Amino acid sequence: MKRFRTRMEPVRVAVVGAGVIGFSTAVCIAEVLPSCSVTLLAERFSPDTTSDGAAGILFAAEFPDIPLERQRRWFKDSFDHLLAIAQSEHSPEAGVFLSTGWQIFKDVPANKKPFWSDLVIGFRQMADEELKRFPDHKFGQVFTTIKCECSSYLPWLKKRFMKAGGQVEQKRINSLQELSSSFDIIVNCSGLGSKTLVGDPHVYPVRGQVLKLEAPWLQHFTRDSDGKTYIYPGIHSVTVGGTRQEGDWRLQVDEGDTKSILERCSALEPSLRKAKVLSKWVGLRPSRRNPRVEREAVQLNGRQVAVVHNYGHGGWGVTLAWGTALDAVGLVRQCLHERRPQAKL
Ligand SMILES: Cc1cc2nc3c(=O)[nH]c(=O)nc-3n(C[C@H](O)[C@H](O)[C@H](O)COP(=O)(O)OP(=O)(O)OC[C@H]3O[C@@H](n4cnc5c(N)ncnc54)[C@H](O)[C@@H]3O)c2cc1C
């Protein structure tokens, strides 16, 4: 007698976006939810995303309306995930490694311990002796965190995604309607693109210009607490910055910014006056009062489609990518549970 087997059709998931948020989310879904077939679609891939140019230092400011415990979890999940890579043989290929340095303040801050101070390694206040090298600064913190260079990390994540059965497609999506007949769940990781793709008026650019310098003698990072001046040594060069220009959409290098960056960074680290400028880059941080990590049911072509959003990480996307990706996986899982089982004989 012929026997029939019940087989579940895979749930078709589209992830829009190939930056650090899109690839982290796509990898997590493909690895954690085997009942899904995952396709990542994006207009731009590495090396042409915002994520590619980010300094990639793990560090965060507080978002005003998200419970601090959730923000701590995002930070911790990301830190632990990247620390495991930094401590493995994958570290050089993935571009993920430990980095030690100083955050310095011109005035003593009201909050001397950021919410992530116990999640990084060896966080402590700088001693007066250590602060002497920064005569304009009154207070400082020393710690070891992680630097994640997305120009290496994104190709590494892409390989991991393909190994987990994921597929990628280069395509601009003008409207979610375009995806509604081919996919059951849409995960939106389009960063600044969400302004038009899902019509979110709350997303805006914060322009950042950085330079890459040849200065292999520098081993420690230095960050001024205003977030506008920083020196981050990396594998092939030192990233120096920067600017934080809200609402500024210009992607061209501004030579006024170049001069100002070199002056500010050389004031903190005089040896940089001798360093060769290797490249200049501008990126637009996909900013929002709070990142949007939530789901909604959207009516597309007469059908209700589950959409999970994960965008708007501003200047902290590399820092929070893995943590928010895990939250997004939880939301996709909820969508799966709510779908009626589709058994096929
Ligand atoms: C100068 C600078 C320094 C930074 N330094 C740090 C740092 O040290 N630490 C840190 O944590 N963060 C840092 N950031 C922030 C970080 O770069 C961002 O938070 C992060 O890159 C956001 O990732 P994302 O995947 O959301 O966006 P993106 O990298 O911009 O990716 C968006 C993706 O969506 C795709 N997309 C958009 N619209 C569409 C559409 N309609 N159809 C198809 N595809 C679409 C794009 O093509 C792209 O693939 C820095 C940013 C800048 C500019």
Image (cartoon, helix red, strand yellow):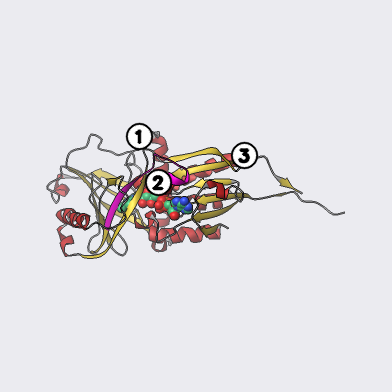
As shown in the figure, which amino acid type bears the numbered disc 2? Leu
Give the percent coordinates (x, y) of residue 97: 36, 57
Residue 103 forms part of the magenta stretch: no
Q: Earlier in the sequence, mark 1 or mark 3?
A: 1
Residue 196 forms part of the magenta stretch: yes
Which residue is the site of mark 1? 64
Q: Which of marks 2 and 1 is nearer the N terminus?
A: 1
Q: In the figure, is residue 65 to the left or right of 232?
A: right
Q: Do the residues labelled 2 and 1 touch (CB within 8 Å)?
A: no
Query: Does ligand 1 reach within 8 Å of label 1's beta carbon?
Result: no
Give the percent coordinates (x, y) of residue 191: 42, 48
Residue 120 visible somewhere in the drawing:
no
Crowding at dot 3, Cα within 10 Å, few <14 / some 14-19 / many 20+, comes out as few
The quadrant where residue 232 appears: bottom left
Which residue is the site of mark 3? 337
Furthest-right residue in view? 1
Crowding at dot 1, Cα within 10 Å, few <14 / some 14-19 / many 20+, comes out as few
Q: In the figure, is residue 241 to the left or right of 79?
A: left
Which residue is the site of mark 2? 320
What's drawn in magenta, residue-wise? 194-210
As shown in the figure, which amino acid type bears the numbered disc 1? Pro
Query: Does ligand 1 reach within 8 Å of label 2's beta carbon?
Result: yes
Instruction: Please state which of the two labelled residues, at mark 2 or mark 1, is closer to the viewer.
Output: 1
Residue visible at 31% across and 65% down in the picture? 236
Per the model, the C-alpha gap separating discs 3 and 2 is: 26 Å
Q: Earlier in the sequence, mark 3 or mark 2?
A: 2
As shown in the figure, which amino acid type bears the numbered disc 3? His
Residue visible at 16% across and 47% down in the picture? 131
Give the percent coordinates (x, y) of residue 129: 14, 48
Q: Please name whichever residue, 19 or 92, is drawn nearer the observer in this view of the structure.
A: 19
Element class at badge 2: helix
